[in-house]
Image (cartoon, rainbow, N blue to C red):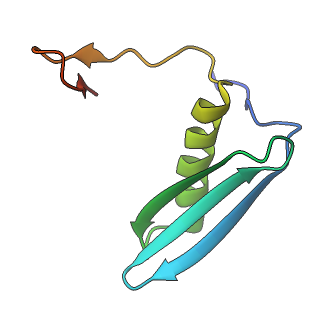
Amino acid sequence: MAQPDPLSGREVIFEFIALGDSVRVAAVDVMTGEEVYITGPANTPQSDLERIAARKLVRKLGLAEEPEKKTPRRGGRGVIV
C-alpha cells in the first residue's frame, strides 16, 4: 500500500545544474523557503533525482511519517544506515 505524499498541496521548485559528469539538484519548498541539495550522476533519470531531493526535503521539513531508525556505531561516532 502506497503511503500518502507528505508534499501534496505544497509547491516545490526543482533546479538542475550540470557540473561535468554530475548534476546538482536543488529542491525548494515555496511556502517555507527551505531548500536542500543533492548531487548525482548526469545520466540518472530526472524523475529519480527529483524523488530523492523531495525525500530529503520532507525529512528537513519534519513531514516524514516516522523517523528512520538508525543503529549507532560502537564508540558513539556516526550511525549505521
Q: Nearer the viewer, residue 27 or 1?
A: 27
Quarter-of-image position of residue 60: top right
* Above/below status of 52 relative to 70: below
Q: Position of residue 37 (x, y in %)?
A: 54, 56
Q: Is residue 39 left or right of residue 17?
A: left
Q: Where is the N terminus found, in terms of image quarters?
A: top right
Q: Position of residue 42 (x, y in %)?
A: 43, 76
Q: Residue at x 36, y 81 (%)?
A: 21
Q: Position of residue 61 (x, y in %)?
A: 67, 31
Q: Is residue 69 left or right of residue 72?
A: right
Q: Is residue 49 left or right of residue 12?
A: left
Quarter-of-image position of residue 25: bottom right
Q: Residue at x 55, y 41 (%)?
A: 56
Q: Nearer the viewer, residue 22 or 43?
A: 22
Figure label count: 0
Q: Residue at x 73, y 26 (%)?
A: 4
